[in-house]
Amino acid sequence: MTEITSNLERKLARGEFVLTAEVCPPKGTDCSDFLKWSRTLAGVIDAINVTDNQGANMRISPLAASLILHREGVEPLFQITCRDRNRLALQSDLLGAAALGIRNVLALTGDHISFGDHREGKAVFDLDSVQLLESMKVLESGFDLSGKKLAGTPSFFVGAAAAPEAEPFELTLFKLRKKAAAGAKFFQTQAVFRPEKMARFADAVAPSGVKIIAGVLLLKSAGMARYINKNIPGLTVPDEIVAELEQAANPAETGVEIACRLANALKPYSDGIHIMAMGREEVIPEIAQALK
Amino acid sequence: MIISQQKPFEEILSALGDSRSVFIVGCAKCATVCKSGGEEEVWQMQEALTSSGREVTGSIIIDEACHMLRVGRDLRSKQQMVDDADALLVMACGAGIQSVSAAIPKKTVAALDSMFLGNIKRFGHFEQKCSLCGDCILNESAGICPVTACSKGLLNGPCGGMDEGRCETDPDAECAWALIFARMKESGDTLNLVKSSPPKNYTKIPKPGKLKLSK
């Protein structure tokens, strides 16, 4: 029996409410800010999501950045996408993560390369997220995808992404079921703005037993909300929230209020909250506090 | 059919370099339908080259420029004009261009970019439906190819960027999986919505592709 080394896993297994947050690793080698924020948040957050060339924008390897956190005693949630790696690279990075003691993995397809800063590159997508999850199961059985035996077997706490607000919902549902069947133990969701859609999602996911960590996005202005609606795949800030930010005397503060309100509204339907602070990591403790 | 598009004229001129005399080769099949290398385009090219100070020694439209034997034979029928040219400018797909470069040991210049295997939706309107992956899964995907129609080629359902049945890369494009899902529901054949599709087997498309029929 493998020893459980993930705090996130332990807490979810005990039925405790968890908090995760996204901290984007740097473009470059200077990890001091990344590390500073991660250390600051370590007291309030159960695991830090280390994004993988987020939005197809090239940054330091999430495996390297995850290791930097792990060495500092901060628990990383290593995000790995299929956009930039074929099946060999995916497996070897996963084995690398396991050998370095990184257990939490979020298996993703990845945003399309055309959204990022290297849009002329070749997107890989040799596997999709369901096949990536299945590959992790194969690795955990002591073999690789070609059937060869591994020297040392990895063990992961595996999550997958979900988009509870995407319509038509039934079109997303069959893939969620495939992800659950392929071994996802938790769904970390895209930002949710409508708690009623989260309720529908939680109902649908309940029979699978997969834990839900609901995404909350921190907005700072109406302009940012409009930018997101136009440029970020899978994210839609509803008009009434855009209007609320528009009319706010201090939109940045109102953004925090909205995030706290949403986090509390999503709590009944989830096992945890995932905060995407979009560069305003300093307010994460405030959102965490509001959930108490 | 192979969909192709003419390169910018400046690029063609730059590729011709100091070749002063040019023999032009067009194709009567795909490039004619795409209006990139048919009779009309070859004539226009001839005009454009002449006005930019190059000499055109002659031209030919080959019935299928991808047919290597035919290309060799047809070029021999214009031997003198070909011999008189410093370079051959080929207005055909990449396959056609290479039939020419294989037949004649002379500078061969590509006038077109080859884009995809396309269906003709209506005149002048082409769409890619098939990626020639060598491992056809249409029998499992309700007759709509996700390898091609999905911008990420996902085999197990829509990505997180799908919303309102639209693709994240193009709000005007329908999500391939929305189309597949609708068709599977209609036919009641929904097994592949439950069973996950395994990774594709790329050994089925050797690179470069080769096929020799045995009798």
Image (spheres, rainbow, N blue to C red):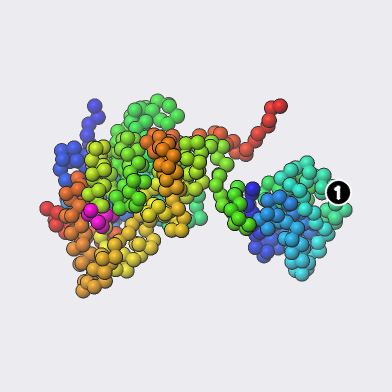
How far across and down, in percent of the image, does residue A195 sit?
22, 54
Q: Is B102 left, or right, of A124 in this rendering?
A: right
Q: Position of residue A73 (x, y in %)?
A: 22, 45
Corner quadrant of residue B123? bottom right
Tell me: A269 left or right of B180.
left
Tell me the kind of residue under disc 1: Ser
Front-lying residue, A226 or B129: B129
Q: State the residue position of label 1.
A: B77
Residue nearest the observer in this picture, A40 or B184:
B184
Q: What residue span does the magenta drawing correspond to?
A: A191-196
- Residue at 69%, 61% (x, y): give it: B12
- Neighbor class of circle 1 (other Cα within 10 Å; few <14, some 14-19, many 20+) is few
Let me know if residue B112 appears in the view: no
Looking at the rendered structure, the secondary structure element under dot 1 is loop
Q: Chain of mark 1?
A: B
The quarter of the rendered structure image containing the C terminus of chain B is top right
What residue is at 64 percent from the left and 54 percent from the top?
A: B4
Placement of A128 over or under A241, stated as above or below: above
Image x and y of residue B103, in percent = 78, 45
